[in-house]
Image: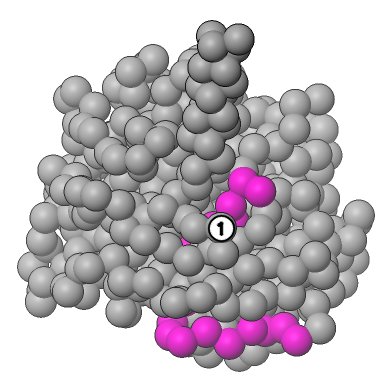
Amino acid sequence: MKYLWLAFVSLLASYSVAQSQFVYTNNNVITGTANSPNSVSAFLIAADGSLTQTSGSPFNTGGKGGGNNIDPEEIAIASRRNASFLYAANNGSGTISAFAINPSTGHLAHVPGSPFLADGPPGGDYSLAVSPDDKFLFATEDTATVIHIYLIGLHGVLTEVPGSPFPTGANSQGLKVTANGKFLIVGEGSIDAVGVYSISSTGILAAVPGSPFAASATPYDVDANCASDLVFVADSGSAALIDAYSMASTGALTPVTGEPFSNGTTSTNGGLALSPNNQFLFVTDTFSQDISSFSVAPDGALAQIPGSPFATANWTGGTSVTADGKFLYTAFFTTEQVDGRQIGANGTLAAVPGTPFSNEQSQLGVPTVITFPRPVCPVK
């Protein structure tokens, strides 16, 4: 009986560890006009959605911060076997830092060889995306016209694959790999279009027939649903538009009826995220200091949730949903803070206790945000 009890206690402890959820920000710190050492802040999520910064946070990346745009995808997470890794772009040095994540404490430890070279200094604003099988990391930078493709090792080490970087011919911002792992979606900002590329078994990219596909304005962030048949694009500019496309099995995109959709303000978009059940789409409305919430119809049409947009305390940038779908966290890019919202069953947003939460960085920065464990589409 004694051993059975000990086994039960151990099982409960393991369950408790598995339920821990964290928020990370890539701070990309800037001091005046000079880039400063970059850092990642880590927060533990409480049951009510409030955040507490973890021991040792913020963690120095070993690279330089910087950036000019509110790139919402400068941080990514991958899991190989029983280990998880966090990747943070260093805008000022053109590198990518890799950390091993302690799933119990949220603590970050540098992966050997980190940071890994991408485009090198001076660098621009990066976008990162991980394939659903956690095999590849894709990275692009908004002043370059290439996509870097890295193989993620079992210990988190990045190795650029043969044939990388892949030329796209456009300055890009926003990356997303479809849940079926077949396609990489790219916001090709310099040509106001969305690129779609098939992914080979070795990670090499090839444009699908018809790519790039026209967007309503300059793409800023992209997302796709778990069925890999709907794509959403947040466009920048005063129009504050959101493009919605149906995706064919070939990767081709067709605008859905009624698109583009307005975010409900005259403010530009800063980032977007689908809820894990794909029923809601959340879009940050940067300069109007709020977040729009939409219901997503089966055909991809968007409709504002009653009460949307929901007011926040400052300018909003990147945003991320927790794996359980209960909370939405958004970076305030001018105040180095994180906003927390509880997601209602009907898609409404309510401030969590204590929001916003400081990442304890006094310098100006361009922070982006991600949750851990990351939302994962069900395997079919």
Left/right of residue 37 with respect to residue 368 in the rendered view: left
Residue 311 lies within the magenta run = yes
Classify the position of the N terminus by image quarter.
top right
Q: How many marks?
A: 1
Residue 148 visible: no
Residue 239 coordinates in the image, percent (x, y): 62, 84
Residue at horizontal 91%, vertical 54%?
Answer: 298
Left/right of residue 289 with respect to residue 117 in the rendered view: right
Magenta-highlighted residues: 307-324
Q: Quadrant of residue 107?
A: top left
Residue 248 lies within the magenta run = no
Q: Quadrant of residue 328?
A: bottom right
Residue at horizontal 47%, vertical 19%?
Answer: 82
Residue toward you, 210 or 236: 236
Residue at horizontal 35%, vertical 33%?
Answer: 102
Residue 184 coordinates in the image, percent (x, y): 59, 38
Residue 352 visible: yes
Residue at horizontal 77%, vertical 49%?
Answer: 277
Classify the position of the C terminus by image quarter.
top right
Residue 55 coordinates in the image, percent (x, y): 24, 49
Residue holding disc 1: 47
In the rendered view, would you say 28 is above or below 335? above
Residue 250 coordinates in the image, percent (x, y): 78, 32
Residue toward you, 226 or 211: 226
